[in-house]
Image (cartoon, rainbow, N blue to C red):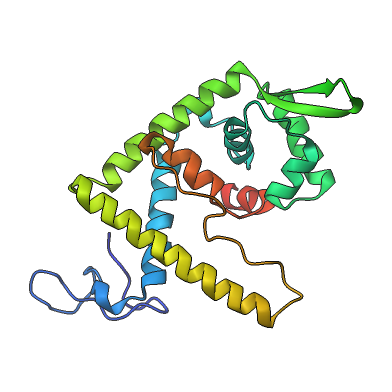
Amino acid sequence: MTYDINQSGITPAVCRDDSRSGPGCAPASDQIPLGVEIQRLARAVRRYLGLTMPASAREATDGNASIIMFLDRHRGDEIFQHDIETRFCITRSTASRVLTRMEHKGLIIRKPVARDARLKRIELTAKADRIVADLVANGSRAEDSLTAGFTPDELVRLRGYLARLHCNMDAALDTVAQTQPTRAPAQSATGQEPSHNAGQLAASIIRNNHTTIEEEQERNQ
């Protein structure tokens, strides 16, 4: 990967082989803020997953993939439309429109519950199950590429470092929340515990993406 040295916020590049500055060379890693490096890595992983998305999952665009993986993680739980609204920070009308489209695509079914016929539980179909399996398999391949050359011990240490980074940001967010009480309470940088299963990478990335459905739609246009 190369970087444009004229890009805003990028420090002059340094070639790793002979320390010469110039276009086409990667910036020295110790000159780039760690937060920026993490953002770049996350974007690279998302781009890889997008480019290698299985054909079966192409129907799960415009935010549908996020909802599918959310439903997959909560199999056995009663998930209703209001849960989708809360999890993805979308309005009732947007959630209704997205779920109706998914139902027409054969990705979900909505079933009334015995205690209240007005409530409709959302469940994945066999078609969606196949998409889940393909996304998880693709995520496993992505993680194999991401961690190539690392020893098991190095990966354990890396996870420990990442956990410490999350804790640091949680503490910083808590401090900010105390000085700005009108804002929502601080949440973990991930929102939940990281997955330790390489095959769950796709689900992890999707569930840790806190953009709204509308932002995903704009990005896919």
Residue 196, image x, y percentages:
39, 42
* Relative to 203, 114 lies left or right: right
Asked if residue 2 is positioned above or below residue 205 in the image, the reply reads: below
* Relative to 182, 211 lies left or right: left
For the question of whether residue 4 can be seen, the reply is: yes
Residue 89, image x, y percentages:
72, 53
Q: Quadrant of the rendered structure where residue 119 is? A: top right
Residue at 61% of width from left, 33% of height from top? 68
Which residue extends farthest left? 18
Residue at 55% of width from left, 60% of height from top? 188
Q: Quadrant of the rendered structure where residue 92 is? A: top right
Residue at 63% of width from left, 42% of height from top? 63
Q: Nearer the viewer, residue 88 or 79?
A: 79
Residue at 80% of width from left, 42% of height from top? 82
* Relative to 73, 114 lies left or right: right
Across the whole image, how many numbered discs are drawn on residues? 0
Residue 121, image x, y percentages:
77, 27
Q: Quadrant of the N terminus?
A: bottom left
For the question of whether residue 54 can be seen, the reply is: no
Asked if residue 201 is positioned above or below residue 215 in the image, the reply reads: above
Q: Nearer the viewer, residue 139 or 86?
A: 86
